[in-house]
Image (cartoon, helix red, strand yellow):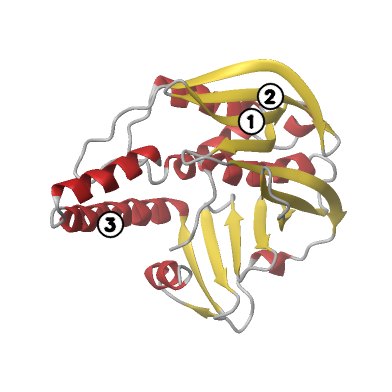
Amino acid sequence: MIGLSRSAGWFLAVCVFVLCSAWVADAGVVAEMVRYTKGSAKREKFRILMSENKLKFDEQGGGVETIFNLNTGEIIYVDVAGKTYTQVRLVDFVKYMKERTGKIGKELEAQLSQLPPEKRAQIEEMMKAQGQSLPGSEFQPINIKVKDTGVTDTIAGYKAQKFEIYEDGKLHEELWISREDVFKKEFDMKKLSGFFKDFRRLGTGRPQTEGDKMLDDVYGSGFPLKTVTYMPMGGVMVEEVSKITKAGLAESEFLPPKGYRRVPMEQMMGGLGR
């Protein structure tokens, strides 16, 4: 199964496209990103290629490329090692992932029912600590609060403002949002925010709350250049823009590579998890 990044991390990478498109109408842009855990010297680097509402995520050192076409609402997953790809609409992908999550939950519930009570209780406590809902239980709304700290910083050459996201009273995430006018000239951020809203909800299964709407407003107001995520089991994950450069990008960069074989979405999702 594809390992999705934290929700804000996905949105941060997508929004770099908008930042760049304001500079030059027809030229492509390459954004260099870095992902790391605080306290660790390890750095994961990846690139985002962007042109005319199309984005390509290139996980350097990995075998997967992901392409988003905001014009058509489609996603392309490319398995470079296997020379295969799948191409689906976002709505179909979200539906598939929700159905798959539900199926996995039922399978886990069946397995837990076979365990001794003390062992089941141990696993359930571990799941709660990770912020996961227990199989068979109703999804409970999370109390989300958004705090505008008023703190600013310059990231990748642009001024960004820090917001803190709290879940049930605990600090969950920091978002550094850029609201400079130059970023708003070429793109409707609210439309982009809506397009990726389902990704941020993916896997939670919980109903939308007033706090979720506040968070949507923050995403729709500007460009997240950096996210800091406080993991439920400890550790702090950071994703941020490190450098942005202009580059001429061909249309073929945002299409499946020639000679690659198209496979069903179900096959691709399972194959990439091995």
Residue matched to label 2: 162
Q: Nearer the viewer, residue 190 or 100?
A: 100
Q: In the image, what residue occupies the spot 37% across and 54% down?
A: 97
Could you say which disc has been placed on residue 175 in the image? Answer: 1
**Height in image: 147 above or below 172?**
above
Asked whether, in this view, residue 35 is left or right of residue 68, the answer is right
- Dots 1, 2 in contact, CB < 8 A: yes
On the image, the x and y values in percent for residue 154 come to 83, 30
Instruction: Write down the quadrant of residue 99 in the picture.
Output: bottom left
Q: Residue furthest front?
A: 118
Asked whether, in this view, residue 147 is left or right of residue 153, the answer is left
Could you say which disc has been placed on residue 104 in the image? Answer: 3
Instruction: Give the CA distance from mark 2 to mark 3.
Output: 37 Å
Instruction: Give the CA distance from mark 3 to mark 1.
Output: 31 Å
**Height in image: 182 above or below 135?**
above
The local secondary structure at tag 2 comes to: strand
Q: Amino acid at mark 1?
A: Leu
